[in-house]
Every structure is written in structure tokens, then in C-alpha cells.
Image: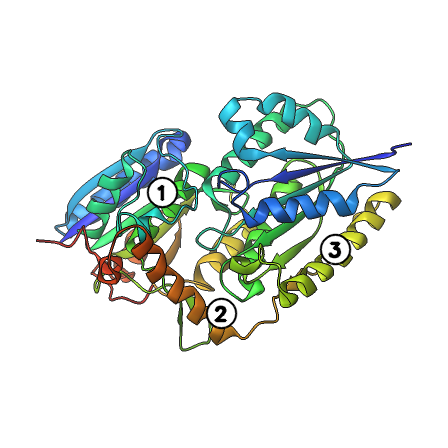
Amino acid sequence: MTEKQVVILAASPKPPGKAASDLLAKIAADTLRDETVGVRVINARETLAKETTDEAFAAIAAADALIVVFPLYVFCLPGMTMRFLQRYGEYAAKLPQRKQTAVYSVVNCGFPEPEINEEASRVIGRFARAVGARYGFGVLIGGGGMVTMSISPVNKMIRKYQETLGRIQAEIKAGTCTPAASVNLRVRFPRRLYLFMGNISWRMWIRNNGGKTKDLYARPYQPV
Amino acid sequence: MKAYILSDGEFATDRLLKLDAAVKRCLSEEGFEITEKRLEKEELKYCVGCFGCWVKTPGRCVQKDSMDEINRTMMNSDATIYLVPLVFGQFSANMKSALDRWIPNILPFFIVRKDGSTMHPARYAKNPRMVMIVYGDDLTAEDIDLFRDMTANHRRNGEVLIYEGDDEKLKKELLAAGLTKAGDML
């Protein structure tokens, strides 16, 4: 019998199927779900586009735990993710009673250093408090450009991610939510090689689009 | 000298109107030519992380709305002043969308800065000085610290000022921020 309900908010602005955050949300759902924990994944982008926020907000407000999964955009939450949370904040403010939902975050960034995501996790902590919820901790993932690759260093990182989700699951089952330091997960891959590969990929990408490498450096707003 | 003021119409509170007037008065006294843009709620499309601004139309977002003009005006200004309503300790959704869609102005490549952190390089040799003036009716120390950390820990061109109603203090801090073109350190 399901005793606890978890909502995983997949909050990447990217189209479905293209985002590392979607994969991380799916792994979270698969890991957390069992005979006593029910899991529902809500896609923030689709919810906003289809204007089905009231139904999604009701599910979040009723959940025992909320896990917000999103990519880092310019060192904090994407505008779309903020829009969803801002609107939820307005919704929660009108509720006669608010459940002390346990909130966690999973943040991934394209830079190799997971620590860059720290402030974004703190923003989710502030959000949690603003809506009358509790905040546990953030799972911060670096090297997001590799997360969808099935290679050994990524698979090892994913296993650590699943272990951390196990810790979250134990808290959810116990009805606790202990504030704790962020869990930093990095892909053990040579940093210089990661950056080099990234830099090569942009050159390949623009050529595939029919452009030239020098086009990458265009300055369309250059003062004349 | 040109200054560009970007604000959020969704949070057009009395505090914003007072702040906006104080900033414009200060800039006018210093002889700045001022352009202003107040974003309407959800006026801007969200950045969807497609990287089209890097590999399809380099330097310009592929989505068509007012962001192209915002970026053009910004890059042709000496200083961009963001009037930032804090929500959960970060930019409001509108302002964050504008910041997300500023990325056409940087290059896709990775660089490692002197302190060892990773960053994308600037697209332009000279960039407007970025000043972010935070306001709100009930700002908390925690929110302010979070916003400062978010900026200072990662940006080399981003001055954070806190506006709590003191116009004279704001003027001093605004002028001290150095409202001239910055180089290519972002």
C-alpha cells in the first residue's frame, strides 16, 4: 500500500527528451518508487504551456515530498523554472492549510564543477520556506553535458546519484527532512579533455548547420 | 555616455517607481542618454537551451520577440542597470528570462579563469558595465546575501546594489560602480 506521495518536478525549459534534467528526473522516479512510495513526475514546461498549473499545484501541495530537478542557467534557476515556482508561491499563499512538504533539489550544470550550483540550491531552500515547506538539501551535478552519455565515468556518477536518492527515500519514509549540506557529484573525467571536447563540438555543430567556424564569433550588435 | 535601464513591470511597486525615478535623476545629472525598457509579465519567451544563438544565428537568439532589441540596445550602452525584484533570493521570472537570453552575447567555448573557475568568454571586446539594483518591500538579509553570492561568486562584471529607499546613498553607490564600458571579463 502506498503511504507516501512524491512529486518530481522536471523543470528544464528544453523540449521533452532532450534534457539531462529529464533523465535525472526519470532516474529519481525509478529509484524512489516502491510499494510504499508513490511517485508522480510533473513536467513544468508542459504544465505552463497547457495551462494545467492548478491541477499540478494541487498535487504538489498534497505531496509528502517535492524534488525539483532543473539545469543551471546563468548561475541560477532558469526563467521558466522561476515562473513555475513563482506561480506556485502565489497558489500556496491562498491555501488555508499548508502541508510541511519535504523539498529537495537536483541541479545540473554544463561546467565541470558541481559547486557552481550551490546558490541555485539555496534558492530552492528559500522557495521551500516561502511556501511553508521544509528543505533538505541539494544534489549538485557538474559535467551536465555528459549526463546522457552511457560511459563508465557517467555511470559511476549516476550510481552515486541513486545512492543519494536512497538517502532521500529513507527520509521520506521516516517522515523526516533533515537540513544538510549539498551533495556534490562530479563526473570523474579529465577536466581539460571535457573542456576541449566541448570546444570542438561547437565547431562541428555550426558546420553541420551549414556555417563556418569563424561564424561562431559573429558580432551582430557591434557598434557601427 | 549611454545607460540602459531594464525593469520588471510585474513588480511595478511604489518602491520600483521611486527607485526608477532616483536612477534616472542620477544618470541625467551625469549627462547620460537613457533608454528604458520595462518588461511586461511573460513578455519574453523562455530560453529553451537550444544553443541556436551560438550555432544557428551566432550572436542572436533564434526566438522572435523584444529580446533582440534589448540585446542590441544593451550592447550599445556603456552601462546596463537592472532593477531587480528579489523572489526567493534570486531574479524574478521576467528578469531571469532577460538574463537567460543575454547569452547570445557570450561565446560557447569554455575558458578557465585565473582563479580556476570555468566560464564562457565574451563575444565582444567591450561590454556594458552591469549594475543590479535589488529592491523589495521586505528584503531579508538572507535574500540579499544569497543574491550577492550568486553574483560575486561567478561574475566579474556585475555590481550589486541594495535599494531600501535612500536615494542619496543609491546615487553615491551608483556613481562609484563606474558606469563606463567594461572590458571582456564577465
Do marks 2 and 3 share a chain?
A: yes
Q: CA distance from mark 3 to mark 1?
A: 35 Å
Q: Residue at the location (34% across, 52% down)?
A: B103
- Tell me: A141 left or right of A96: left
- Badge 1 density bin: few <14, some 14–19, many ≥20, Cα 10 Å: many
Q: Position of residue A162 (x, y in %)?
A: 74, 55
Callout 2, which amino acid? Tyr
Callout 1, which amino acid? Ala
Foreground of the two, B74 or A221: A221
Q: Position of residue B89 (x, y in %)?
A: 52, 47
Label 1 near label 2: C-beta < 8 Å? no
Report the chain holding disc 3. A
Where residue B152 sits, quadrant-wise, is bottom left
Q: Position of residue B134 (x, y in %)?
A: 41, 47
Quickly name the residue at label 1: B98
Number of the label disc, if any, that sits on residue A194:
2
Nearest to N terminus: mark 2 or mark 3: 3
Quickly name the residue at label 3: A162
Foreground of the two, B168 or A13: A13
- Tell me: B63 left or right of A33: left
Q: CA distance from mark 2 to mark 3?
A: 23 Å
Where residue B39 sits, quadrant-wise, is top left
| Image quadrant occupied by the N terminus of chain A | top right
Can residue B13 be seen here?
no
User: Quick check: A1 above or below A162?
Assistant: above
User: Quick check: A132 above or below A122?
Assistant: above
Nearest to the eye among marks 2 and 1: give it.
Answer: 2
